[in-house]
Amino acid sequence: MNKKIFLVLIFSLIARIIYFVYDQNVWWDAAVYLSMGKFIFSSGALGFWEPIRPLLWPFILGYGWWIGINPIIWGYIFSTLFSLGIIYLVYLIGNKLYNEEIGILSSVLISFTWIFFFFNARLYTEIPAVFFMLLAVYCFLEEKNLLSGFFLGLAMMSKFPAGLLLIILLIFSWKKVKNILELIIGSLIILGPYLAFNYFYYGEPFSIILFAQEFLKYAGIWIFSQSWWYYLWEILKQNVLYVFAILGVYFAIKKKEYLLTTIFVAFLVYFSIMAHKEIRFAIMFLPFIAIIAVVGFMKVLKNKESLIIITLLIFIISFNVPLQVENEYFDYFENKELNGELLIVHPLVGYNAKKATLMYYPWFNSTMADYWLEYLETKNVEYVALDNCEGGFLCDPSDLDCEKKKEEIYSYLKENFIQVFNKQSGECKYVIYEIA
């Protein structure tokens, strides 16, 4: 291994280990994946299930839990390995398409871009997905199309939008039928069993994938709706050096090097036209922009030392550790035996419980409020855990009946249940009801 990339990987690893010591917060999606992992390896006896989630990451996390390792630590180990793999693959792709210097500088830029570094600790699916996407691109450049398709299948089973990369690589292979077939066959090795299961269980192979896209249109959309230029601005806020991607695209088109630019632009457009926007989605195309930006920077300024210094300075300025969430609301059911059903509106409560039913899935609105009120009246519900801090029990402002019907749920609980937990933290209220 090249000595320079080895040093980049070592410093990247050390930084991530240090960060994990201070930040082990479990966020919403991570709690879902951890709970799904329990569900898989307990044959449904523990945890809970969200069908719209791809299966690879929950499977990896669940396996750690199954063999007796703390799944959060286990997940962080894998997330860090995937991150280091991304850094190395960015180097390999940059080196193959341009030169070693471009590869090294691109690996530094992506490694110490704050949002990429930060989400290494979040146990979300972007980093595993991007690792397999880059492996697929590298194999494609090496003309190993069957392997490329195989890794694309793993990428899609990490995060469904990775399928856009399969379309791009198929377009770039349009002159060679053999390459197209190998890409499709390779991806079906992974996707085939999943699509077959969907067909026999749901009656349609792509229904869950399509519903996952539909889900993003409605679930908390008033919270995550942003302007079309959101990613362009947010990426520049991560590191001003990404502005050189404009020049990188120009030089790539001039030399007829279209692959990285096509991938970057396609994913940027895809996520930009979606109403639901989060900066973490940019991780899906950030490695490709990193290479393109470094090419543009080196063509114009040709000063690798300044690129490294600016990147590290911006990283240090951006560095922050979120406050550790210590709220007994989330841990209330950790060692509690349940005789009836537990309803939750936050997945972290369900992760710490043995079993839970999701009131927030697929999304909460006035129609679902009616459903859950009837559910409370007719089912064997023992506990209900509610909070108003995240999207699980929030009403869309345009749904005028939602707040009124939500109050009906609260009224029913106050009349028929006992309040066993109540905590206020800022504007967030956490309350747990037990059947009287």
Image (cartoon, rainbow, N blue to C red):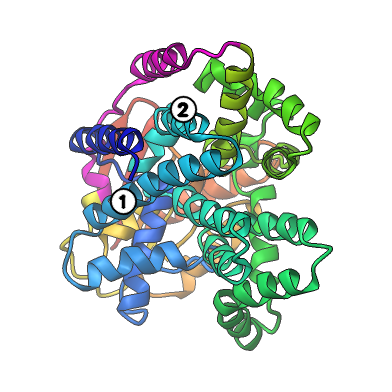
Residue 197 at x, y percent in the picture: 58, 84
374 lies above or below 369: below
Residue at 41% across / 29% down in the picture?
Answer: 108
Find out whether residue 317 is within the magenta segment.
yes
Q: Would you say 298 lies left or right of 17 here? A: right
In terms of secondary structure, where does tag 2 sit? helix
Residue 353 at x, y percent in the picture: 27, 62
Is 223 in front, or is 287? 287
What type of secondary structure mainly makes up the magenta span?
Answer: helix
Residue marked by disc 2: 105
Residue at 49% across / 65% down in the picture?
Answer: 50
Residue 78 at x, y percent in the picture: 31, 55
Residue 298 at x, y percent in the picture: 57, 19
Say whether marks 2 and 1 touch (CB < 8 Å): no
Q: Which quadrant of the structure image shows residue 166?
A: bottom right
Q: Would you say 262 lies left or right of 292 here? A: right
Q: Which residues are magenta?
A: 301-330
In terms of secondary structure, where does tag 1 sit? strand
249 lies above or below 375: above
Find out whether residue 15 is within the magenta segment.
no
Q: Amino acid at mark 1?
A: Ile
Residue at 33% across / 21% down in the picture?
Answer: 319
Q: Which quadrant of the structure image shows residue 302?
A: top right
Residue marked by disc 1: 432
83 lies above or below 334: above
